[in-house]
Amino acid sequence: DAKTTQPTSMDCAEGRAANLPCNHSTISGNEYVYWYRQIHSQGPQYIIHGLKNNETNEMASLIITEDRKSSTLILPHATLRDTAVYYCIVRVRDDKIIFGKGTRLHILP
Amino acid sequence: GAVVSQHPSRVICKSGTSVKIECRSLDFQATTMFWYRQFPKKSLMLMATSNEGSKATYEQGVEKDKFLINHASLTLSTLTVTSAHPEDSSFYICSASNPLTGSKEKLFFGSGTQLSVL
């Protein structure tokens, strides 16, 4: 049973920042927030994860609210290759991944 | 980064035959591997957790006699779909856990296998 809620789909103009929200109001203290994406007919790709603090890597930034009940994944300059389904997942670090329905992100030229 | 290789990428078989899918961790030893299936436009559904040297743990509703999992070494897990039927046609994906990544991500996914049963 996925513990997150995400919008079904979103559009973003190419070159703009894509902000993908995720609600995880029942997150436990030892659970991390993970983001993966899946491009059509490929395996999921890890993007980023965090516990409490905001995180940034070469792909994206993760903003986690202070109460940890929601987070936002930010792709700073979206390109057409960022079109994918984005999954927000909460889990203990060594635990299995249960995928929810994710957000289908369309990058518009 | 860590690489998980899945083979074959695509397979077509006749109804009633068995199909084996391989999942290999190429540059790390994976004590745990996971198998998922995915129907078109749907999310990934966890089928089973495969632990090296022990029996796999299947999720509720997944037939263990239908989907045989073998994790005989630290770098290889196999999923065999036995007596395949058209309803078994799906995208099968494996992932492997690298216990030595420190604070970085531990789970890495294969590129998936598209199974079509005629």
Image: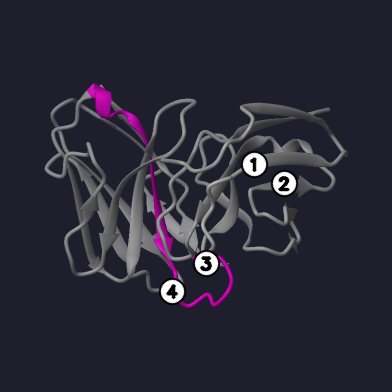
Q: Which residues are magenta?
A: B86-106
Q: Which residue is mark 3?
A: B2
Q: Amino acid at mark 4?
A: Pro
**Disc 2 element:** strand
Q: Residue B35: x, y in percent? A: 34, 49
CB atoms of marks 1 and 2 within 8 Å: yes
Q: Earlier in the sequence, mark 3 or mark 4?
A: 3
Q: Which residue is mark 4?
A: B99
Which corner quadrant of the image does residue B55 belong to?
bottom left
Q: Which residue is mark 2?
A: A72
Give me the C-alpha separation between circle 3 and circle 4.
Answer: 11 Å
Q: Which residue is mark 1?
A: A22
Residue visible at 50% across and 46% down in the picture: A43
* Chain of the residue on which disc 3 is drawn: B
Q: Is residue A75 left or right of residue B98?
A: right
Give me the C-alpha separation between circle 1 and circle 3.
Answer: 27 Å
Q: Where does the N terminus of chain B fall, quadrant-wise?
A: bottom right
Above or below, A56 against B44 in this view is below
CB atoms of marks 1 and 3 within 8 Å: no
Give me the C-alpha separation between circle 1 and circle 2.
Answer: 6 Å
